[in-house]
Amino acid sequence: MPLLTLEYSDNILEKEDLRDLLAQLHLILEKKLPTQLESCQSRAVSRPVFVVGNGDDKNAFVFVSIRVLSGRTPQVLQETCAALMESLTAYFANSLEVLQLQLSLEINEIGPYFSKTLSAEQ
């Protein structure tokens, strides 16, 4: 059930293969939380209008927000965050070299959650 949103400033360099990154993050969530891979949902959202700090054109951000069902220990959540941040740091290495990139990550626990999967046959 993890719901992942990756928001990024439009000036980051690594925009071409974000689907690959999201798939990689799903594998981390599957292993670390743990969760079922099929339940992971992700989206990437470009933010063309943004200001980071003083508004310098070299300032950039990537912010990942993940919502999960409650019940995991703080240690599990911390280890998950560490693994995700390691993957994000590696993926955005070029932007980290060229830009003043701020990488941020949060995991929020949510209460009861309802979902229904619909197929084309229905």
Image (cartoon, grey):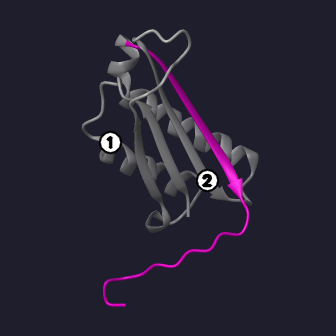
The image shows residue 93 at horizontal and vertical percentages of 36, 22
Q: Regarding mark 2 in the picture, which secondary structure is present there?
A: strand
For disc 1, the marked residue is 18
Q: Name the mark on residue 38.
A: none
Q: Which residues are magenta?
A: 99-122
Asked if residue 117 lies in the magenta stretch, the reply is yes
The image shows residue 46 at horizontal and vertical percentages of 39, 37
Q: Which of the marked residues, 2 or 1, is nearer the chain's N terminus?
A: 1
Quadrant of the snapshot with the C terminus? bottom left
In the rendered image, the vertical position of residue 46 relative to residue 1, given as above or below: above
The image shows residue 55 at horizontal and vertical percentages of 49, 12
The image shows residue 89 at horizontal and vertical percentages of 44, 27
Crowd class of label 1 (few under 14; some 14 to 19; many from 20; radius 10 Å):
some
Residue 115's quadrant in the figure? bottom right
Quadrant of the snapshot with the N terminus? bottom right
User: Identity of the amino acid at label 1?
Assistant: Leu
For disc 2, the marked residue is 67
* Image side of residue 50 versus residue 121, left or right: right
Marks 2 and 1 in Cβ contact (< 8 Å): no
Q: Residue at x 30, y 24 (%)?
A: 13
User: Identity of the amino acid at label 2?
Assistant: Arg
Crowd class of label 2 (few under 14; some 14 to 19; many from 20; radius 10 Å):
some
* Image side of residue 81 versus residue 28, left or right: right
Residue found at the far bottom of this picture: 122
* Image side of residue 79 versus residue 120, left or right: right
Q: Nearer the viewer, residue 30 or 120?
A: 120
* Image side of residue 77 versus residue 25, left or right: right
Q: Residue at x 45, y 63 (%)?
A: 37
Q: How many marks?
A: 2
Q: Residue at x 32, y 20 (%)?
A: 94
